[in-house]
Amino acid sequence: MSNNNIKMSVKGRYGISVLDKNKKVKKEKSVNNVFNVVTYEGAYYSLIGSGLFESHYAAVGTGTTELSRSSPNLTSEVSGRTAYQDASRGGNEVDNLDGTSTVTLSRTFPFSLGSKVGTFSEVGLYTLASNGTFIAGQLIKDEFGNPTTVTVLSDEQLVITYILEWTLPNTSQLIGSGTLTDASSNTYDYEMYAQPYFNDYTVGSSSEKFRYDEGGTTTEIGFYAADGSTSLFDSGSRGSGFDNLLVHDGSGTVTVTTRNEVFSPSDGNYTGLTYLSFYSPSSSNSVWSGVSDTATNTAFSSDLSRFPLLIKFVDPITKTSDQSFSITASYTITL
């Protein structure tokens, strides 16, 4: 079997403004578009843990250590974070015309006037007003990329701006292939297709629901003929789904493996099984887990779909009423 990871990437930058009591920017104390790292845990929380558009809080510190994607926090955070700011997909997504979209999320975090007084050397982004996941951060740097500091007086206001650019798949992608051999030594070639990140993958949609979840969601499988819509069998008809096991190695690699699911002889017989489409049992109609475009092997663009994997049997399968069929699948995401 050949495999390719599902790749999702992020770039981050921040800006710092210092305002006087009349809200005028003090340019000599401001920095713009400084690169910052998005941590592995921050990327995981955002892309897999439903936090992409959620509220974030900005913080400052006095640390002098260069931050990395493995950093758990600012080195020396100063107590007291900003109020939260969130973001949205609508109006912030651009099609890169290469199978991906870039979603640019900008959040501006003003500290109240006089609430931050002193000299600061690092900035960061968190998911909570205290503690929480460390999303991104870095030392304050000048236009040459050298560490510097910003001093804020009691009659001045500190404002932090964070921009995170997430590049996500908006089309199906071939991520694996192999051959299945049955008990009679019949062989069936198959292909695995990752699906677009968002359930509604129309670029520019305001829908923020996505197919990649934390792996604890119960999953069901629909069996479909070559047209992608004729249902041959649905695991939900047995009244039970199966769970997924998710492992994050802490360094940007996430592996999701489905529990081995067995379909017994009593689950019926069918010919021409071409597609296995995974979906959440919360979907009210399993047809939404079928295939909307067999030319590109893409599932329906719908908020009802909740799984990023579609399996196609290049050689359609036949299952008789005296045969069992079992399936387990896994995919790997690189953040």
Image (cartoon, helix red, strand yellow):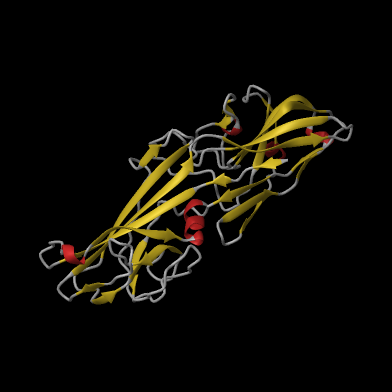
Quarter of the view holding residue 65: bottom left
Task: Name the residue rendered at 74%, 26% in the picture.
Answer: 316
Q: Residue furthest left?
A: 22
Residue 309 placed where, x, y %?
Answer: 61, 39
* Residue extending furthest toward the front: 144
Q: Is residue 159 left or right of residue 296?
A: left
Residue 299: which quarter of the image?
top right
Residue 123: which quarter of the image?
Answer: bottom left
Q: Residue at x 61, y 60 (%)?
A: 249
| Residue 222: % across, % down | 66, 34
* Above or below for 24 versus 288: below
As rendered, which of 30 and 8 lies closer to the eye? Answer: 30
Above/below status of 140 relative to 100: below
The answer to whether one can see residue 284 in this image is yes
- Where residue 219 sits in the image (x, y, percent)? 64, 44
Q: Quadrant of the N terminus?
A: top right
Q: Is residue 152 left or right of residue 54?
A: left
- Across the whole image, how many numbered discs are drawn on residues? 0
Task: Find residue 179 and report its horizontal and vertical position in percent.
Answer: 77, 35
User: In percent of the image, x 88 and y 32: which residue is there?
Assistant: 185
Is 179 located above or below residue 143 in the figure? Answer: above
In the rendered structure, the answer to whether residue 5 lies left or right of residue 105 reads: right
Q: Residue furthest top?
A: 227
In the picture as drawn, the residue positioned furthest to the right comes out as 184
Along the viewing direction, whichever of 98 and 327 lies nearer the viewer? 98
Residue shown at 75%/31% (left/top)? 189
Residue 243 appears in view: no
Q: Using the image as rendered, state which of residue 49 and residue 288 is in the foreground.
A: 49
